[in-house]
Image (spheres, grey):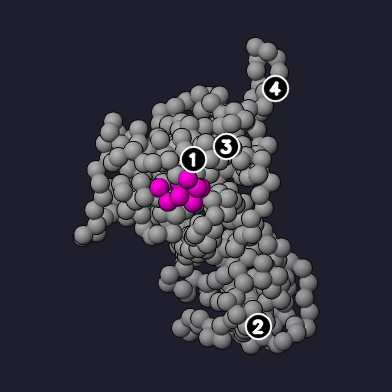
Amino acid sequence: MTNPQPATTGAALLDALLAALTRYVILPSPQAADAVALWIAATHAQPAWAHAPRLVIRAPEKRCGKSRLLDVVEATCHNPFITVNSSPAAVYRSISEDPPTMLVDEADTIFGPKADGNEDLRGLLNAGHQRNRPAKRYDAAMNRVESIPTFAMAALAGIGAMPDTIEDRAVVIRMRRRGPGESVAPFRHKRDRPVLRDIADQLAAWLRADLPTLETAEPSMPVEDRAADTWEPLVAVADHAGGHWPDRARAAVLALTAEADDHQETSTRLRLLTDCRTAFGTDTALPTAVLLDRLKADPEAPWVDYGPSGLTAMKLGAMLREYDIRSANVRFPGGQAKGFKRADFADAWARYCPADDPADETTVRATVLTLPGAAVPAVPAVPAQVSPGTA
C-alpha cells in the first residue's frame, strides 16, 4: 500500500479511511464498514464528546477477522492503549482529560463466566461511557479520596456476546468467516502500519482543528435515548465531513441498531412478562395455578425447568412484583382463589413489551395454551370481589 495523498476535505479523508479499512478486513455489511470508519474518526475528537461509544467486535468462532480489524483500528485511532494483561491501576492512571483509545482483545476473558479478578476493569468500561463518572479511590498515604477519570472510547474484541451493559453502549460489529470468493490484502505491521498512521495523523489534524464546533454539534438523530447518545459522535463527524457521509452515517445507525434489536437477548423477567401476555390470551383474570400451567406448557419457554420444580407461585410473584404486579384473592365462578388480573399487567406490557399492533394490546392472542385434561375456569369480565394478596 502506497502512502495516500493528504485528503483535501473531511469527506475525502473518511473515504480514504474506509478504503484502507476494507482493504484488510471483510466487514459484514457496507453499513458496518461505514460505522467502524466513523468510530475510528470520532476517537480523534474525544474531548468534544459527552459520551464515549464502545466498539464491540464479536464473532461466533475463531478466525472471523476480529483481531485483524482490531489491528487496523489500532493503527488508525487516536493514541491507542492496548489493555491486554494491563493492570487495572495502569489503565486507570492512563486516562486523562484527553484520553487514549482503549483496545481490548479477547474481551470475553474479562466478561465471561470464568473471568476472575477483573472487577475494576469491568467497572471502568461500564462507567467510562459518559463524562463525569469518575472512580473514587482512597489514597491511604495522602489520607484523601481521589477522583480518577474513566471517560474513554474503547474497542473490545471477543468471541460471543459482551454483557448488556457494554453492548447497550456500543456500536456492535458481528464478524464472520470469509466466504468463498472473499479475499483481503495481507496485513504486515512493519509495512502497512506507518501508512495507516499517516491517515490517523490527517484525521487528528482535521478534527482537532474544529473541536469547539464539534463540541456544540447537535446532529439530528434517527434514534433516541441511549442509542442516540452512543451514535451522536459518529453522526457529528459525518455531518462535519459533508458529502455523502451524513446520509451514510444515518443509514448505518438504522441498520446496526435494528440488527442489535434483532439479536437482543431478553432478560428473564421481561421474558416472563411477555409470556404472561400470551398465557392470558383474552381472559380477564386467571388463577395463579392456571397461569403457571400455561407458562410451563410452552416447550420453548424456560419455565418448566426454572428451578428444581419449575416456576413456582412464589417465584412468579417475586418476579412480577418488580413491575408492581401482585396477585389478589379473586372470586371465580368455581370459588375464590389466588390469581392475577389482566388489567394489572396492562401498564407493564405497554412500557416494557408493547404489542406490534398497539390497537391489539388487549387482545394479543385469542388462542390460549390449554393443557390436556386441564380445566380452565370461565372468568367474568368483572370479578365480584378482589382483595390484595400474594401469589
Q: Is residue 122 above or below residue 262?
A: above
The reply, left or right, for residue 189 in relation to residue 111 is left
Question: How far apart are the alpha carbons under marks 4 and 2?
Answer: 55 Å
The reply to whether residue 323 is visible in this rendering is yes
Q: Quadrant of the C terminus?
A: bottom right
Residue bearing the label numbered 2? 359
Q: Position of residue 100 (x, y in %)?
A: 52, 32
Look at the image and say whether residue 13 sits in the magenta stretch: yes
Q: Are marks 4 and 1 in contact (CB under 8 Å)?
A: no
Q: Residue at x 66, y 71 (%)?
A: 350
Q: Which residue is nearer to you in this view: 343 or 373?
A: 343
Question: How far apart are the alpha carbons under marks 2 and 1?
Answer: 50 Å
Question: How far apart are the alpha carbons under marks 4 and 1?
Answer: 38 Å
Label 3 vs 4, first from the N-terminus:
4
Look at the image and say whether residue 294 sits in the magenta stretch: no
Q: Residues within 10 Å of mark 2 (few under 14, many from 20)?
A: few
Residue bearing the label numbered 1? 203
In this rendering, the count of numbered labels is 4
Image quarter of residue 327: bottom right
Amino acid of disc 1: Leu
- Residue range of the region highlighted in magenta in the rendering: 8-16
The mark lying in front, picked from 3 and 2, is 3
